[in-house]
Image (spheres, rainbow, N blue to C red):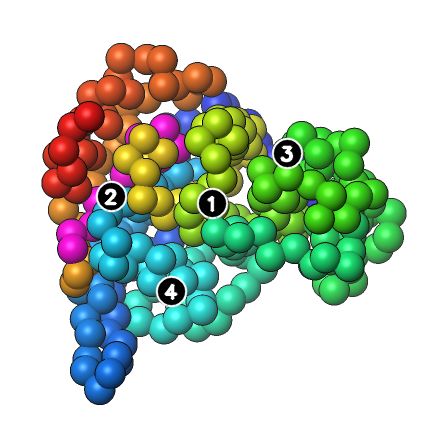
Amino acid sequence: MPAQPDLAAVPDSATATAVALSAVRHEYRSGGRRILALDGIDLRLAAGESLAVVGPSGCGKSTLLRMIAGFLRPSRGEIRVGGATVTRPGPDRGVVFQQPRLFPWLSVHGNVAYGLREAGVPRRARRERVEELLGLVGLGDVGALRPYELSGGMQQRAAIARALAPDPAILLLDEPFAALDALTRERLQEELRAIWLRTGKTLVLVTHSVDEAALLGSRIIVLSPRPGTVVLDEQSALPRVEHARDVPEFAALRSRILQAVGAPRS
């Protein structure tokens, strides 16, 4: 696999479009009624950006992510990834769900290698890639274990490694830390930010957490209550450093996101 660029070395002027949404609208049926989930979403996401999508429950955050992944089709509008219209899932988009969804009969190594094996990657290349990724997510010493032998946080690290294994251009994360305890969640947030800084991947993160959005988004959009429309679209001024919660810009950004969401300040 080709070496990944260090994001810190990528110039801020890079303007290649990784994801483009044009007048996207999504409706679904429920109990005989048509429900409008999202309406009028126009978005251009540059390669290497980390987009955090935040908003109230039911505003269409996960629906938006699933359409980018190719699991759903928009009712109207168009979604393009790498210049091509999205019609189905593809190896250019890795997905991490709320639950790890690891295969319980495979080892951690086997789970991370699964997609590579299905794609016909030779055994030696698979082993090297998996070892590289397990080291990246801090699981270098547990590759032989089964998922049930891992903590929840370690399972989600394995899921992130599995999503990264095919070297997708885009990593899509649907509330990946929501089920974890607060301390584990904060630790994995910091680790995910470090992975983004190290790999230069384009990230799309759906979250209910304002703090998580402020920390992990190089760009943050806030969606309104259903039907979801963009009420805030802001580039983050946080420096690309570890422990970004400690810098003054974090509190200011968090306050602006809270105001857009309409949540009370704590």
Q: Earlier in the sequence, mark 1 or mark 4?
A: 4
3 vs 2, front mark: 3
Q: Which mark is residue 179?
A: 1
Q: Is residue 234 visible?
A: yes
Amino acid of disc 4? Met
For marks 4 and 2, give the CA distance.
16 Å
Which image quarter holds the C terminus? top left
Q: Nearer the viewer, residue 107 or 132?
A: 107
Contact between marks 3 and 2 (CB within 8 A): the answer is no
Q: Nearer the viewer, mark 3 or mark 4?
A: 3
Residue furthest to the bottom in view is: 32
Q: Element type at marker 4?
A: helix
- SS for dot 2: strand
Image location (x, y in percent) of residue 139: 71, 34
In the rendered image, residue 138, in percent from the top left (x then y), is placed at 67, 30
Q: Which residue is mark 4?
A: 67
Residue 137: which numbered mark, if any? Answer: 3
**Residue for point 79% across, 43% down:** 145
